Image (tube, rainbow, N blue to C red):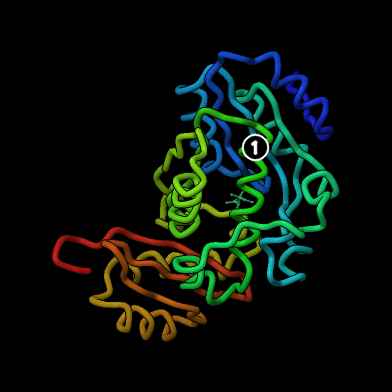
Amino acid sequence: MTAVISDIAKWRAQRAGWQGASIGLVPTMGALHAGHEALLARARRENDRVVLSVFVNPTQFNDPTDLERYPRTLDEDVARARPYVDAIVAPPAEAMYRDHYRYRVSENQLSRRWEGEHRPGHFDGVLTVVLKLLNLVQPSRAYFGEKDWQQLELVRGMVDAFLLPVEIVACATVRDADGLALSSRNRRLSPEARARAVDFPRILQTAADPSVATTALRAKGFEVDYVDDHDGVRLGAVRLESVRLIDNVKLREGRS
Ligand code: PAF
C-alpha cells in the first residue's frame, strides 16, 4: 500500500534509502485526471522510483475564492496514482511555507505576460513551490504538461538559471475525445457549459489570427482574457460560467 507522507522528516528518511536510484517527480495540486495519469505512466517507464506530490499551493492563487473552490480529492487521487508511484508526498502548508512566504522566486519577463498579467503573483507562487518541491524530492526528472505552456517555459528557465540538477520532461496535452484539454477545473463546468467548452480549442486551432479567435470566442459566449501567438504557439485563456480555462495549440508553418 502506497503511503501518503505528510511529514517532511519522514519523507527525507524514505528518500535517503533511495540513493543511486533515478527518481521521477510528478508535481500536482491533486484532483488527478487522465492527463496526470499520462505523466505518472511516463515517469514510471523512465525511472526506478516515482513520486507524486499533492499540494494545493496557496501562493499561486491570486483569487481566494478560486483557492477555496479548488477540488480536494486526496482519497481518489491516491487510488488513481497507486499503480504508478512509490510514494505520495502531501506536505501541509505550514511545512512548505515555514517562512510565511518571505522568500520567493520571481521572474521578471515572461511571467509578466498572459497568465501573469491576468493573475498577478501567480508565477511567483508556482516557481517558488516548484523549487521547494524539487529541493524536497531531489528527483532526476520532473514531469509537466504542455497545457500549461507558460508554466513549463518558466520552470525550464528557473532550472537553467539556478543550475538545478533535474531534467524537465514536457508531456503532450491530454484531451477528451471532443478536443477539450483535461483540467481539474473542467469538473466545475455544468453539463451545458462543458458541451460549449469544446469551441475553445476548436477556435484556437482554426482562427486565422488571435483577433479573429477572440471575436469568435466572444460570439460563442466566452469571456476572453487573452489569445496571443508566440513562438509558434497560440495561447489562450477564457472564462465560462466563471470557470477559467487555458489552452494552447501549435501553429502551422507560416503563422507566427
Ligand atoms: O500545474 C500544477 O498543477 C501546479 O501549478 C504545480 C506545478 C503543481 C505547482 O503547484
Q: Position of residue 155 (x, y in %)?
A: 50, 50
Determine if the C-beta at disc 1 is less than 8 A from ligand 1.
no
Left or right side of 255 for 218: right
Q: Residue at x 45, y 58 (%)?
A: 180
Please tell me in which quadrant of the rendered image residue 116 appears.
Answer: bottom right
Q: Residues within 10 Å of mark 1 (few under 14, many from 20)?
A: few
Please tell me in which quadrant of the rendered image residue 138 appears.
Answer: top right
Left or right side of 199 for 89: right
Seen from the viewer's position, the closer of residues 235 and 139 is 139
Q: Residue at x 46, y 60 (%)?
A: 150
Question: Tag 1: residue type?
Answer: Asn
Please tell me in which quadrant of the rendered image residue 3 appears.
Answer: top right
Residue 208 versus residue 148 in the image, above or below: below
Residue, far left: 254
Q: Position of residue 200 (x, y in %)?
A: 42, 69
Seen from the viewer's position, the closer of residues 9 and 32 is 9
Quarter of the rendering occupied by the N terminus: top right
Residue 218 versus residue 106 in the image, above or below: below
Left or right side of 161 for 88: right
Quarter of the rendering occupied by the C terminus: bottom left
Seen from the viewer's position, the closer of residues 212 and 8 is 8
Q: Residue at x 76, y 27 (%)?
A: 11
SS assignment at label 1: helix
Seen from the viewer's position, the closer of residues 190 and 149 is 149
Q: What residue does disc 1 label?
A: 135
Q: Position of residue 6 (x, y in %)?
A: 82, 35
Q: Position of residue 195 (x, y in %)?
A: 50, 65
